[in-house]
Amino acid sequence: AGAIPAIREVIVCFHGIKAYHTSFNLFADYVLRRAPNRYVIFQIDEMGRGFSEPSRNGKYTQTEYIPLVHSLLSYFKNTYLPASGVIAGADLKFHLVGHSFGGCLSCIFTSVSPTLVKSLTIMAPAGLMNFIPFGLVQSSPTIRYLTKLKLQKRENQIQSWRDDFYSHTGEALELENEQVNDLTRMYDNNPHAFPSFWGTFSTFPLVDISKQLKIIKEIENFPIYLLWGDKDDAVPFSS
């Protein structure tokens, strides 16, 4: 086996609004098997999800999320990675990978802090999708109230999680059940899980990230990867 590189590529994964860090387990396993010793991968639990603390001021807007991501990446770069034996280097940049809300968050962050980002990969990103009328929920108090009542019920939460999967058979169903069981345990054991989900769903700017993508596009030699599944409903986007 060859020597471990002194400087490795670093990937940071941001999950969707209903999920937490385990949604990237298969992705991380695949990358590390294909390229051992080349990458360091961080799977982040966003505020109030998984093992992360909730927002300190109870809000989940862009104002709370973006500085938190900046602090997190700065900590990885300047403190955690050097201390763990990965020589980060002053010019280290991160590959950001985000799904759904995580894609929206990664995109907005990159548009305001591009010097920390080496590439952006966003999968079915919120802000370029039309299957949930985020704008209507966020702008109408009545719809917001009724939606919250519905999503607070566990049976509706589970159905919502299952609706994110399309092939409910065979190995795909096994993975679906595994993810649903993980989410159920998180919601059972983390009292902040639903409030943080709802705070993000109802207040974070999830409607349109085309402006941010166009800003990123102007960065010279900056790779952006936009990915959708065959059955995703997507707003047509032209680069």
Image (cartoon, rainbow, N blue to C red):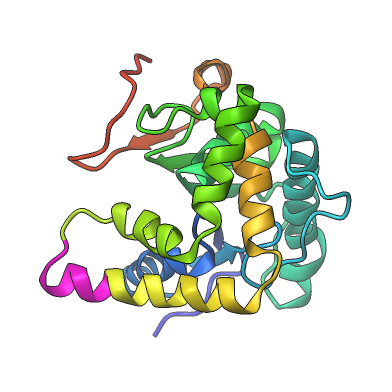
| Number of numbered tags placed on the structure image | 0
Q: Is residue 186 above or below residue 78?
A: below
The answer to whether residue 17 is visible is no
In this rendering, position of residue 195 left or right of residue 225: right
The N terminus is located in which quarter?
A: bottom left
Q: Quadrant of residue 108?
A: top right
Residue at position x 19%, y 68% in the image: 172
Indicate the quadrant containing the C terminus: top left, top right, bottom left or bottom right. Answer: top left
Where does residue 138 sit, x and y in percent of width and height?
61, 28
Q: In the displayed structure, does residue 47 sit left or right of residue 206?
A: right
Q: Is residue 55 magenta?
A: no
- State which quadrant residue 142 falls in: top right
In the image, is residue 173 part of the stretch drawn in magenta? yes
Which quarter of the picture shows residue 86? Answer: bottom right
Q: Is residue 217 above or below residue 109?
A: above
Which residue is painted at 49% across and 27% down in the image? 221
Q: Residue at x 80, y 35 (%)?
A: 63
Residue situated in front as seen by the camera: 224 or 191: 191
> Viewer-proximal residue, 40 or 100?
100
User: Magenta stretch mostly in which secondary structure?
Assistant: helix
Q: Is residue 110 above or below residue 182?
A: above
Residue 204 position within the rendered picture, expressed as x and y whole percent measured from the top left = 65, 35
The residue sitting at the bottom extreme is 1
Q: Residue shown at 70%/61% (left/top)? A: 48
Residue 26 visible to the viewer = yes
Q: Residue furthest left?
A: 170
Q: Which residues are magenta?
A: 168-175
Q: Nearer the viewer, residue 53 or 8?
A: 53
For this rendering, which residue is in front, 85 or 51?
Answer: 51
